[in-house]
Image: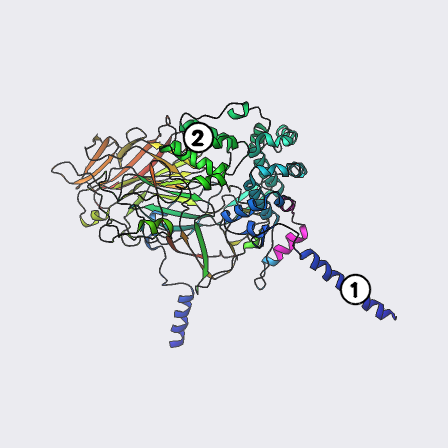
Amino acid sequence: MKSIASALLIAAVLCGCGAPNPGGESGPNSPECKGLTLEAGRSGVLLGVGGWSRPVTDRAGYTLRGRLLVFDKPHFSNSGMEFRGSCPVYLELQNLSSRRDRDVAVYFALADGLECDLRDVHGKPCRPNNDNTALTSVLAYSYFWTRQYWAAVPIDGSVRLRAGPSLSLSSPNLDGLHIEMSRGPSWYAPEGDTNRYFLSGTFSPPTDHPSPPDAHAWQGRLDLPAVELRAPKP
Amino acid sequence: MSKRGRITVAVLAAILSGLAWLLVSSLPAREPVYEGKPLSRWLAGASRRDARRAVRACGTNAIPTLVRMLRATDSPLKLKLVQLAGKQHFIKFHWRMAGVLHEEAIRALLEMGPRVEFAMPELVKLYDEAPASPLFTPSWFLKEQIAQLFVGLGPAAKDAEPSLRRDAASGTNSTRTVLDALRCVDGKEPLPWEQGNQPRFSHSLDLVEQIHKSLPFPGPTTRAKPLVPELLAMRDKPGPDGYWARFALQEIDPDTAERVLTNSRPVVEPPPTTTSDPETATPVTEPEVDAVAFLSGPRPIIQPPAATTPILEAGTDTPPLTVGDWSEAAGPPKRRTLRGRLLASWPSDRRNNSRGGSPRIEMELQHLALSPDGLPFTVYFDPGQSLQCELRDARGALVPSLPASQSPAPRSCWITVPFDGEVKFPLDPGNPSSPSGSDGLTIQLGRRAWHIPARDTNLFFLSGTFTPTTNRVHPLGYPVWAGTFKLPAVAISAGRP
């Protein structure tokens, strides 16, 4: 009896039962994430939401906090060919400033400011498949690589910024968990991989751009808590 | 020598030949080296700034390497091997796929600036050699990317005009990028300074317009070089003029910008003395920070004083929320680009005192366009004009509205909808007090307000029509979205949060 109870306990731990939801009330099933999908045709299921980072106030008194969101891979069909993209990763920033005179702005440029890190359940960093974008990717382009602009976070508001290439494709279809950061690391866990993975990151927007008019250029570093992820089942 | 001996020698020779071939083929091709690392290593690295530095240091010596990268293809055998390798997890292979090499090469060519002209013959040849192909195939991407280079080069890419004209006429490859490139290289739309006029900008909008014409994508271009003297003269102007001058200078002539823009360091702003909303603002106590150390060293991160800053900690104070459905996407004809939805949440004090107060009404906007410029949309939100709301009861009857109170109304402002992303912002002024002597629910949006008595526990439904003001130009020149969409109803109850 004791051994059965132990086995059930171990199984429960291995299955993640009882593990705290990293997003707390802000998980994928929370009301605020209801219907939060991408464009029709690129729609994806929200795989995971990280907890909010600690709010950071810069010297001028403007406060931001952030978190990561990861969606399932979008699916494309064109000219008889089927494509799968990588899992879209979003950085969400929330303006918690007590100063209410101006919006907060961050200069958002792909591969400049957001550093992400994937770890296994033991906290060991997963080795990125950097040299080939995705291990089995045949066609992988960050077509919209020109993205860089001032993103304004409204007073008491928030923004979600696409943190990877917007149109990254692979053909033939890739199943599994494929995370691709633009010009940064890329990870792939094949379909059926039962391991749990944790994507975390830091965000410190570049400061070598002139400040925008009518908004405060926020400066600081956010430590983004981990999003728990699993490769889809076959 | 016996027959067996001859076979052994032949097998050994074949093995040695194979090993020699593998050795030779695995040796990296000759390429420029910067700070001890070959150029391709810099390009494959994660830092765009480092890659830019390496490309500029290598100069035209980088062109053969970049052209070789653009010529890379993935053989069917390689693709098969990649697929097979992906099915096992014991050995990690590091493949360099052609698509990745193409992208790295194109980015590097963009960073080269005017010297990319020396690569033109090869680029035109590559463009011609890429066959007409369906969208999203490697060949299609390569053609698109090279065409984008031609856009940036403008008349300097004149040699590409016949190829572009052929593709534009064929229909098969007549993409927007090809048409843009054709327009830019044929010189029929010359920029003012290309007609012998000295560039002069009377105001920032003029400058923004010219910058957008000359900088279709980030990166230095030959066409924009004549702007540099004017930009230098404008760089210290206050407001948007100076901002855009500094921005453009960094894009067009980074070397000069690095030399003259000494103010690109973080600007230290004075701590606030007053705020626009004294009811909700809380003074922030800032630790003493040495300004010199702040400017010259790593920036200290100042954590907010926990007791004085009103912060909604995730998981502990997340307000209850009701969310409306997304609207239909709206925008220019044939290009639905934006959609929105309403959200209602309750401030934390509402749960402590369930009578009186106001829910927070927010709007979320989602960017749906995959435009090659990668820019956000902007909308100018005027609370009194951009949003027309109505409140209905569960039977669909309109709830009469009242003029809004004099409490601080939300200001008109620009809202930036990030490319392929979302923005959420409050529509109500905060927590207006309920009408005198009453409790219940007050919803105040723009110039109108609705009041629901606390005893009324029915559900109410708030919906609206969003039409942002379009007669303004965004101060940074970002695209201004024009259109109208109907926001589906979000449910609100006065009886409980």
On the image, the x and y values in percent for residue B458 come to 23, 41
**Discs 2 and 1 share one subunit:** yes
Query: Of marks 2 and 1, which one's residue comes earlier in the chain?
Result: 1
Q: Residue drawn 48% across and 61% down?
A: A194
Magenta stretch, main secondary structure class: helix
Residue interval drawn in magenta: B64-84
Question: Percent x, y for residue B213?
Answer: 50, 29
Question: Seen in the image, is B341 located left or right of residue B210?
Answer: left
Q: Determine if residue B374 is in view.
A: no
The answer to whether residue B44 is seen in the rendering is yes
- B118 or A71: nearer the viewer: B118
Q: Which residue is drawn at 35% across and 33% down?
A: B238
Circle 2 marks a residue in which chain?
A: B
Query: Does A94 sit above or below residue B15?
Result: above
Of the residues shown, which amino acid type is indicated by label 2?
A: Val
From the viewer's perspective, tell me whether residue B480 is left or right of residue B59: left
Q: How many numbered marks does the figure carry?
A: 2
B284 on left or right of B217: left
Q: How far across and how far down the image is residue A129, in percent?
A: 54, 56
Q: What residue type is labelled 1?
A: Ala
Residue B149 magenta: no
Residue B372 or residue B315, whichever sits in front: B372
Residue B237 occupies which quadrant of the picture? top left
Report which residue position mark 2 lands on.
Answer: B208
**Residue named by callout 1:** B13
Q: Quadrant of the N terminus of chain B?
A: bottom right
Query: Residue B83 lies in magenta, yes or no?
Result: yes
Q: Distance between the residues labelled 2 and 1?
A: 67 Å
